[in-house]
Image: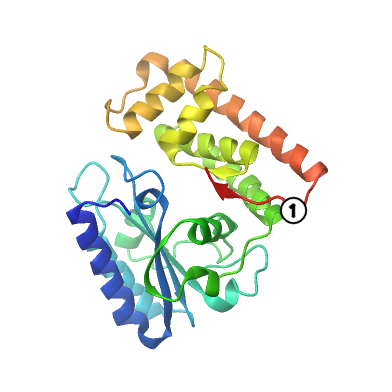
Amino acid sequence: METSSTATTQIHKCLNLVKKILGRDLLGVYLYGSSIIGGLQKYSDIDLFVVSNRAATREEKAKFVTALLNISGIYMKSTTRPIEMTIVEKSQINPWHYPPRFDFQYGEWLRNQFEQGNIEPWPDKKMPDLALLVTQVLLASTTLMGTNPDQLLCTVPYKDFMAATTDALPDLISDLDSDIRNVLLTLARIWSTVATNAIRSKPAAADWVINHLSATYRPVMERARAICTGKEKEHWDDIQELIKPCADFMLSKTNNKITEIMQSYDPNRSIKIA
């Protein structure tokens, strides 16, 4: 686990928060993502996965929102890091079924809605992305509280992991204009994962993709990687016209690979950490 003292303080605050609100129904809290794979980068979130024996009440969710608005940092405007906390009710993910359902999620992309008093700013509780999160927690995480994840969570079937990846792509691409760096790096992670069955950090995924791009598109991913690792500031104007074609190329490669995988489905395949 690679964290700064500030991030460690934030993690402890979050852990105390879920203990206080969920009490004896709290089954497990897990740190995953960049903190575990590749190390925290300049723009990395602190990713926390929480499993409870019951759903939180609306009043409890309001308490989570109030506290996390203060614990979580705002991108580029705070010395503290953004928090991404996902809370699931055990019965919604074990036994496993697809699509799974979550109970509550905090992320900085929801800050404005939370600040306006919208405690549950999502259309429903279905979250295909949980297939990816649960897989990451099982493969590489630190248990902050509770039982080991493999005693609490079910292994996600390979086909459901791929289905979740497919389901995530339209929303991801729709954010390209407003979140260039993150969308490009996430596309890189997805393409590299479906092509190799291995999860990488965003910088490592960018490295993999750069080696599979034409010379025309390499500057786009080299820029995304440099911004991610803090070597360059966010700037895109000089290569703006290449961004969407590069994203479309990665999307096409990803979709083609997923189609190939599902047409020749092998139940013995599994996801690993690169």
Residue 176 visible within the image: no
What is the quadrant of residue 252 in the picture?
top right
Q: Position of residue 42 (x, y in %)?
A: 28, 39
Q: Residue at x 67, y 63 (%)?
A: 98
Q: Split into 4 quadrants, where in the image is the N terminus?
A: bottom left
Q: Position of residue 265 (x, y in %)?
A: 79, 47
- Residue matched to label 1: 268
What is the quadrant of residue 190 in the picture?
top right
> Is label 1 in a helix, a strand or a loop?
loop
Q: Residue furthest bottom?
A: 24
User: In this picture, is 72 found above or below 184?
Assistant: below
- Identify the amino acid type marked 1: Asn
Query: With 161 as the anchor, is 150 left or right in this view?
Result: left
What is the quadrant of residue 267 in the picture?
bottom right
Q: Position of residue 85 (x, y in %)?
A: 39, 62
Q: Residue at x 56, y 70 (%)?
A: 153
Q: Position of residue 43 (x, y in %)?
A: 31, 41
Query: How is the structure coloured here?
Result: rainbow
Residue 164 visible within the image: yes
